[in-house]
């Protein structure tokens, strides 16, 4: 693999085990801190162009799949940019406490990046695993792309969530059944994880997969993030990575969900962060060490299973 750290918010470039690997040449570091304010929450076109230039110029040694660590989940929409480099038909397997599927506004932002990914011709499907968030309470009111779920372009498997109230008819899919005005989701917390992974492998329509991980899918004992968090266990996440790498060709990985202080140069993004984020967290050094341990476990996993 080609381990690459994108230094946007300072949360991962100095963090073990990534700092050590940068120092020894096992990982490359792409400095993009000057772009962070214009990439956070919503990406400006100029900042996107600047980041793509830096990605093209740095960290291309080796033939293995890229593995990006890049900080806060406020930057999760960078996944849609990474996917532009993939030429083969690909399925995106997305671990997150949020579905990131809103249709409006149609920008490159952290709540809508799944739709930007589905606009790419090489992306055949997005499979989202783990949400517990309120995004599923009344998804139509939040501009959720439920039509993509109905059409099979997207599959959503919550870890645990009550039925979603809807007005339109969406029939049924592998991840839900509709009864009247409610979508009854499959709750993975109530299922055998190994059995679900067996089913997941048959539901992926391509040989190539891209793995995107927002650590807010994990509970607070295993990650400390800028967002409300789910309940998936790190052991479940690692088991899924191992199974996907064994059964499909992983063409790339990206990992976000580290905590960093939101800093903005404009009131628009600051307002979005204020209303979207939960009450502001001031993590201690011990709290942040939780993220370092999770990232160390993920790096070890990728080192084992990726060519």
Image (tube, rainbow, N blue to C red):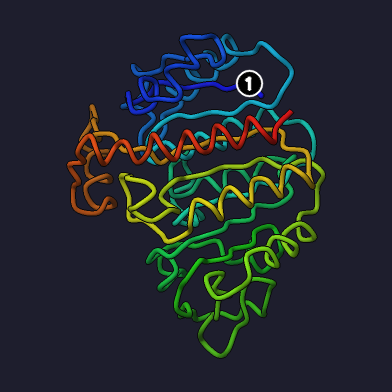
Dot 1: element:
strand
| Whether residue 260 is situated above or below residue 231 in the rendered picture | above
Residue nearest the observer in this picture, 267 or 110: 110
Residue highlighted by disc 1: 2
Q: Position of residue 59 (x, y in %)?
A: 58, 13
- The residue positioned 47% from the left and 15% from the top of the image is 30
- The residue positioned 34% from the left and 28% from the top of the image is 11
Q: Position of residue 143 (x, y in %)?
A: 46, 62
Q: Position of residue 266 (x, y in %)?
A: 23, 31
| Whether residue 12 is situated above or below residue 278 in the rendered picture | above
Q: Which quarter of the figure is the N terminus placed in?
A: top right
State which quadrant residue 262 falls in. Answer: top left
Mark 1 Cα-neighbour bin, 10 Å: few <14, some 14–19, many ≥20: many
Instruction: Give the farthest residue toward the bottom.
Output: 180
Q: Which quarter of the figure is the C terminus placed in?
A: top right
- The residue positioned 20% from the left and 46% from the top of the image is 281
Please indicate, yes or no, whether residue 243 appears anywhere in the rendered image.
yes
């Amino acid at each position: 693999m080609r381990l690459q750290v994108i230094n946007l918010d300072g949360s991962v470039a100095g963090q073990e085990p990534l700092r050590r690997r940068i120092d020894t040449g096992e990982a490359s570091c792409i400095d993009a801190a000057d772009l962070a304010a214009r990439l956070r929450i919503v990406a400006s076109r100029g900042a996107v162009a600047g980041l793509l230039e830096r990605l093209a110029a740095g960290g291309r040694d080796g033939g293995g799949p890229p593995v990006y660590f890049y900080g806060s989940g406020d930057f999760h929409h960078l996944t849609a940019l990474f996917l532009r480099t993939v030429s083969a038909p690909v399925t995106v397997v997305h671990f997150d406490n949020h579905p990131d599927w809103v249709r409006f506004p149609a920008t490159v932002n952290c709540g809508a990046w799944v739709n930007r990914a589905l606009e790419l011709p090489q992306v055949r499907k997005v499979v989202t695993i783990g949400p517990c968030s309120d995004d599923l309470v009344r998804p139509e009111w939040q501009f959720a792309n439920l039509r993509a779920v109905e059409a099979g372009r997207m599959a959503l498997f919550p870890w645990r969530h009550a039925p979603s109230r809807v007005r339109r008819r969406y029939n049924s899919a592998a991840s839900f059944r509709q009864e009247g005005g409610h979508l009854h989701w499959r709750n993975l917390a109530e299922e055998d994880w190994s059995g679900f992974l067996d089913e997941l492998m048959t539901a992926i329509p391509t040989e190539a997969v891209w793995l995107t991980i927002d650590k807010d899918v994990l509970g607070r004992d295993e990650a400390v993030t800028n967002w409300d968090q789910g309940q998936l266990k790190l052991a479940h996440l690692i088991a899924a990575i191992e199974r996907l790498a064994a059964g499909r060709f992983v063409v790339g990985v990206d990992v976000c969900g580290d905590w960093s202080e939101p800093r903005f140069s404009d009131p628009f993004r600051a307002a979005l962060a204020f209303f979207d984020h939960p009450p502001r967290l001031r993590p201690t050094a011990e709290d942040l060490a939780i993220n370092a341990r999770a990232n160390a476990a993920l790096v070890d996993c990728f080192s084992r299973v990726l060519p």
